[in-house]
Image: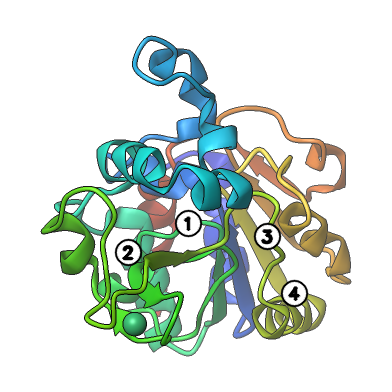
Amino acid sequence: MNDTITKLKDLLQNSDNIVFFGGAGVSTESGIPDFRSADGLYNTEYAYPPETILSHSFFMAHTEEFYRFYRDKMLYPNAKPNKAHIALAKLEEQGKVKAVITQNVDGLHTEAGSVNVLELHGSALRNICMACKECYSLKKILQTDGIPLCACGGTIKPDVVLYEEGLDMTVMMRATDAIYDADVLIVGGTSLNVYPAAGLITNYQGNKLILINKSETPYDRHANLIIRESIGHTLEEATSVVH
Ligand code: ZN
């Protein structure tokens, strides 16, 4: 076990108020690619970049094309929680992790057993009729073609935050409070350049900021510990004997 993992392990062992803030890199180890890092891949298949397709105005104007991309590139119904999700759920069960804040919409933290999960960008597992607000599971999206319709005839929209849409203020406030109160803040699998979510971590008041990310982030100079390894491997190692 290397030095940084030993340091991380010490920090985790000595805290009962850890908050985790994670991005797409947490899910890539479950086989869910980060669409932001793969823009070029879609150029031949789609006439628009992912950021355009995943915007509110595009959804409203080209709902069918939105769903073609969304079903094809955004949904991974067979993905399973990885070592990172499992380690965080275990730490919460031990009373150490107080909140998991995520930018991912795949629901894998909840599936792994985490309870206090704050989904900044919503969840692909929830889909809501724009007319009557009836809620549908992911199955409804997967088992239909074209535009999924509610029993009432209304268009069903994924409960995920699209570009141009604001974040849920209740979730944002709970995330802000959790970070403000945190003793240890672990930021993982995010390059911290998606706002406003990334700005959240500026609320952290402590001196145990841990960044686990394969590439550099704008916050590296504020970090007390930087780990450039796989997040699943790192968290599994660091929690292997936490008691
Ligand atoms: Zn409806």
Q: Are marks 4 and 1 in contact (CB under 8 Å)?
A: no
Q: How far apart are marks 4 and 1 (CA)?
A: 18 Å
Q: Position of residue 34 (x, y in %)?
A: 45, 35
Q: Quadrant of residue 134?
A: bottom left
Q: Are marks 1 and 2 in contact (CB under 8 Å)?
A: yes
Which image quadrant shows ligand 1? bottom left
Placement of 63 over or under 84, stated as above or below = above
Q: Name the residue under label 1.
A: 104
Name the amino acid type tagged 4: Ile
Which label's residue is closer to the chain start, 2 or 4? 2
**Seen from this angle, which residue lies furthest front?**
153
Whether pointer 2 and pointer 4 mark residues with C-beta atoms closer than 8 Å, the reply is no
What residue is disc 3 on? 165
Percent coordinates x, y for residue 231 in the rendering: 45, 45
Q: Mark 4 points at which residue?
A: 179
Q: Do the residues labelled 3 and 1 touch (CB within 8 Å)?
A: no
Rendered view: 159 above or below 6: below
User: Can you identify the residue that label 2 sits on?
Assistant: 108
